[in-house]
């Protein structure tokens, strides 16, 4: 929530006095810097901002922000954040979580926060591994992933975080990565401007337990041909001089083609504001994120805002109901409620 009367702040105003404790080279440092650098541009106050996390390496985030915050328990950050957002709709509430925290024990909390459209900005750090507990496979690890908990290779089909969010009817869904601060800031800015649940998957490197998990897509040598930048209303083209593009076949499937072979007019235009989430869902699966195979099969992968639609947010609807109830019946009486019908005395 933007405060028009807020005084100018700097990155220093948003940076706590706590020592940052992540492994040297961890992608979390880049994400933290992007957020701390962005916050002064959003027109909000530190004292009106809350960061809530669960458990995991990413969940240390609230300690490093000079705002209100809570380091919650495993997977419960969306539930805690929902309570804050509903009780105090004037606050700016962020959730920081990881692929294990959000998609394993916290899966139910996440999908219900998204379907309710609670006014939260949710940052999911996806490194496809459990880092804090020293390298077990996670809900996003690819099939065949050899870890301490899967010495013969994982047989679990992984979650595609964006497809999961879209299946829960999230009203804002995006993807970015930890090696491009500008892209992160642009994506976070768009998410923050959205009223309702904003879900951002951040591909994040764990250089200790899963180093190079996304190198086939995000490394400087690969980006130009492997990253598809989505821009609303523009043809979905990528590669050097935009030689490659995305089309939708008669069967509804998306395919990567050479523009010269099909013609520029055949290239699909991105529509992030389309109410039907099917296009965003198809784009979310255009990678190897939906294919449960090894890194070597990565396909060109979309980044940016997949979906950004307007839908009434949960906090506003709850507040409206409360206002209506008070106007019709007056303020409530807690003692009367506790002593109302349906209670009994046990001798």
Image (cartoon, rainbow, N blue to C red):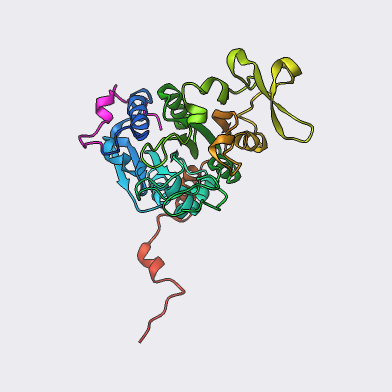
Residue at the front extreme, as displayed: 152
User: Horizontal placement of 277 versus 105: left or right?
Assistant: right
Q: Main secondary structure of the magenta part?
A: loop
Q: Position of residue 183 (x, y in %)?
A: 46, 24
Residue at the bottom extreme, as displayed: 347
Q: How many marks?
A: 0
Q: Is residue 61 magenta?
A: no
- Residues 300 and 149: in front is 149
- Residue 263, can we see it? no
- Give the answer, above or below, for where 277 lies relative to 56: above
Q: Position of residue 207 (x, y in %)?
A: 37, 36
Residue under the point 54% across and 20% down: 224
Which image quadrant is residue 246 in? top right
- Residue 285, can we see it? yes
- Residues 322 and 70: in front is 70
- Residues 312 and 66: in front is 66
Instruction: Quarter of the image for the C terminus: give it.
Output: bottom left
Residue at the right extreme, as displayed: 250
Residue under the point 38% across and 47% down: 84
Q: Position of residue 215 (x, y in %)?
A: 48, 30
User: Horizontal placement of 26 versus 238: left or right?
Assistant: left
Residue under the point 62% across and 15% down: 242
What range is drawn magenta here? 1-20
């Amino acid at each position: 929530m933007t405060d028009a009367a807020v005084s100018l702040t700097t990155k220093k105003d948003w940076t706590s006095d706590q020592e940052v404790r992540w492994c040297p080279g961890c992608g979390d440092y880049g994400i933290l810097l992007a957020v701390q650098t962005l916050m002064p541009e959003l027109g909000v106050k530190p004292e009106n901002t809350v960061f809530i996390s669960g458990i995991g390496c990413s969940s240390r985030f609230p300690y490093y922000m000079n705002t209100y915050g809570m380091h919650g328990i495993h997977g419960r950050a969306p539930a805690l954040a929902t309570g804050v957002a509903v009780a105090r709709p004037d606050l700016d509430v962020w959730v920081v979580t990881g692929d294990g925290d959000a998609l394993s024990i916290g899966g139910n909390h996440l999908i219900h926060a998204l379907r309710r459209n609670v006014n939260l900005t949710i940052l999911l750090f996806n490194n496809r591994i459990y880092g804090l507990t020293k390298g077990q496979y996670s809900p996003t690890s690819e099939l065949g992933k050899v870890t301490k908990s899967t010495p013969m290779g994982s047989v679990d089909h992984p979650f595609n975080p964006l497809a999961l969010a879209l299946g829960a009817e999230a009203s804002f869904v995006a993807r970015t990565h930890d090696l491009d601060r500008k892209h992160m800031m642009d994506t976070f800015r768009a998410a923050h401007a959205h009223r309702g649940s904003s879900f951002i998957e951040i591909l994040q490197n764990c250089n200790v337990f899963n180093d190079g998990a996304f190198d086939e897509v995000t490394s400087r040598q690969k980006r130009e041909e492997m990253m598809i930048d989505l821009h609303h209303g523009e043809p979905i083209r990528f590669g050097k001089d935009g030689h490659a593009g995305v089309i939708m076949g008669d069967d509804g499937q998306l395919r990567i083609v050479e523009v010269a072979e099909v013609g520029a007019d055949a290239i699909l235009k991105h529509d992030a504001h389309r109410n039907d989430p099917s296009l965003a869902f198809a784009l979310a699966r255009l990678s190897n994120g939906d294919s449960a195979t090894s890194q070597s099969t990565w396909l060109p992968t979309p980044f940016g805002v997949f979906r950004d639609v307007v839908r009434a947010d949960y906090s506003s609807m709850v507040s409206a109901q409360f206002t209506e109830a008070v106007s019709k019946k007056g303020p409530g009486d807690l003692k009367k409620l506790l002593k109302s019908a349906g209670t009994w005395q046990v001798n």
